[in-house]
Image (cartoon, rainbow, N blue to C red):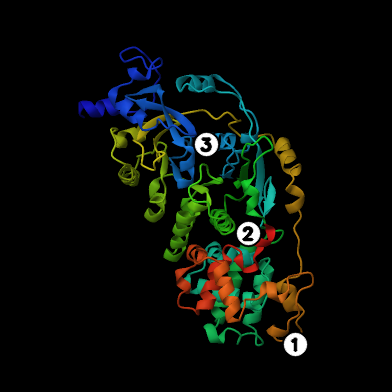
Amino acid sequence: MSERDSRAKGGSGTVSSAGGPEVRGSAAALPQEALEIAAGYAFGGPALDLGALLWDGRCLPDAQVRVPLPMLNRHGLVAGATGTGKTKTLQLIAEQLSAQGVPVFLADIKGDLSGVVAPGQSNDKVRSRAAEVHQDWAATGFPAEFYALGGIGHGIPVRATVTSFGPVLLSKVLGLNRTQEQSLGLIFHYADTKGLELVDLKDLRAVVAFLTSDEGKGELRNIGGLSTATAGVILRSLTAFEAQGMADFFGEPEFDTSGFLRTAPDGRGVVSVLELAAVRDRPQLFSTFLMWLLADLFHDLPEVGDADRPKLVFFFDEAHLLFDDASKAFLDSITQTVRLIRSKGVGVFFVTQTPKDVPADVLGQLGNRIQHALRAFTPDDQKALKATVKTFPNSAYDLEELLTGLGTGEAVVTVLSEKGAPTPVAATRLRAPESLMGPVAAGALEQAVTTSELYGRYAQAVDRESAYERLQSRGGKGPDEIREPRGGKGPDEIREPTGAADRGARQQEQPSVVEQVVGSGMFKSLARSVGTQIGREITRSLFGTARRRR
């Protein structure tokens, strides 16, 4: 190993003046290489403080590693092996964003992020870490709301209608292949054009059953038809899905994602914590549901361009689950969403174990990187380590050695500067969160949920008349003669406009970029009207709910 490599090795250690320069009193005492790295993080505007630079095995508290607040909507990656401190890093970033008035969304896989609402507890480890990185630590709780998918767990129920979830995301949840997904898209298209609202799973099952019955099997003949075998697969998948307790996630009242964009009366951003511990054995469901939330936000929010701070920072935990076995069309939709949602003021951080879990096209959209330690026990681990090193800019560190030697709460960082250029790679000892590092007591969590102003709006599920009831009551009538639902939308609100003027107005109202973001390439072979309709369903534009809610 060269003398330069020997000096560049980062890792665990404490500050000491013995055998090296004094670094606590003056930045000028920093080694030249460390000074060059520290200069890359000397931002003039508002920024989040991540920690202090590690160099040659020592922590240099005068060299602070930071990320500019305006760059948080340029997306990011938090990666590292299990037990290396990723969750605490999320908590640290969420606290500082909240303190600067930026709302945050956190997916809580393990159930230990609820502590963000309560002041932290000082102990020897916290005091030692704060002293090492020159952190003025003070126990602080932050404003938070707690949610749970379908109400399974401790939180305000988050539900989506089947129509708003759309055929592409639903196909991924059900494990359908490409042909079956295309057929499901036709079923959604039929329901849309007939004004049959798919609120919950029994609505979808009723429409599938109707389209394979003697009465309804000719309805899709002109646009490809629906085979009995494919319909059978879809119905069996729905049955198995419900048998696993998944039906609760679909229904009304549907969650309005604008609730994630709130600030507290004191001006701090609200931290929205979605508890997923109760459903972590159903990873494909919650990862796809998180994608629906992102797509919904994209559709609802106006363009803001390059703002001085994000409107929301969204942390997408266990991100690899979203990409596993995903079709190219599905990945293209994700990539487009991530690329374009930045202009809506939303930053997205993917949280996973290694960068290779994230497709290259998506990884290329991520401007901020916090990489915790990696393990290299097996040949596959070694291969993943080498691949991770290649994703970083050129560095003064021996990254292969550094990434396997980082301690808990240490990470390799590179972010975008205020000018949008990558900062130098910096091994960093991270600050300690100021809120409770662990879950709050069950009683306190339950009280926080039930006293929320949103609880009364979403707590009780509603089962109003929709496709199932309308098809059950049709008697001998054809699909065009099915009566309109009581208390529902009128035909002008539900059905697709058929006149040329209506189509032109609708196309002007719905920017084509939305279709690019949520459309699926697999539907290009269908009629244009069918493909456009399916593409918009992922973000609920079919019923115009975003505009009505506003």
Comparing 83 with 366, the one in front is 366
Comparing 548 with 529, the one in front is 548
Q: CA distance from mark 2 to mark 3?
A: 35 Å
Q: Residues within 10 Å of mark 1 (few under 14, many from 20)?
A: few
Nearer the observer: mark 2 or 3; the answer is: 3
**Numbered mark located on residue 476 in the image:** 1
Above or below 98: residue 497: below
Farthest residue, direction right:
486
Farthest residue, direction top:
18
Residue 547 point in image, percent of width and height: 65, 61
The residue identified by callout 2 is 244
Residue 430 point in image, percent of width and height: 46, 30
Q: Secondary structure at mark 2?
A: loop
The residue identified by callout 3 is 93
Q: For the residue marked with disc 2, what is the amino acid? A: Gln
What's the residue at 45%, 36% (across, down)?
A: 67
Residue 98 point in image, percent of width and height: 59, 37
Nearer the observer: mark 1 or 3; the answer is: 3
Q: For the residue marked with disc 1, what is the amino acid? A: Gly
Above or below 194: residue 239: above
Q: Of the two numbered discs 2 and 3 on the same chain, state the one appearing first in sequence.
A: 3
* For residue 85, side relative to residue 267 (left or right): left
Above or below 358: residue 382: above
The quadrant of the picture occupied by the C terminus is bottom right
Q: Of the two numbered discs 1 and 3 on the same chain, state the one appearing first in sequence.
A: 3
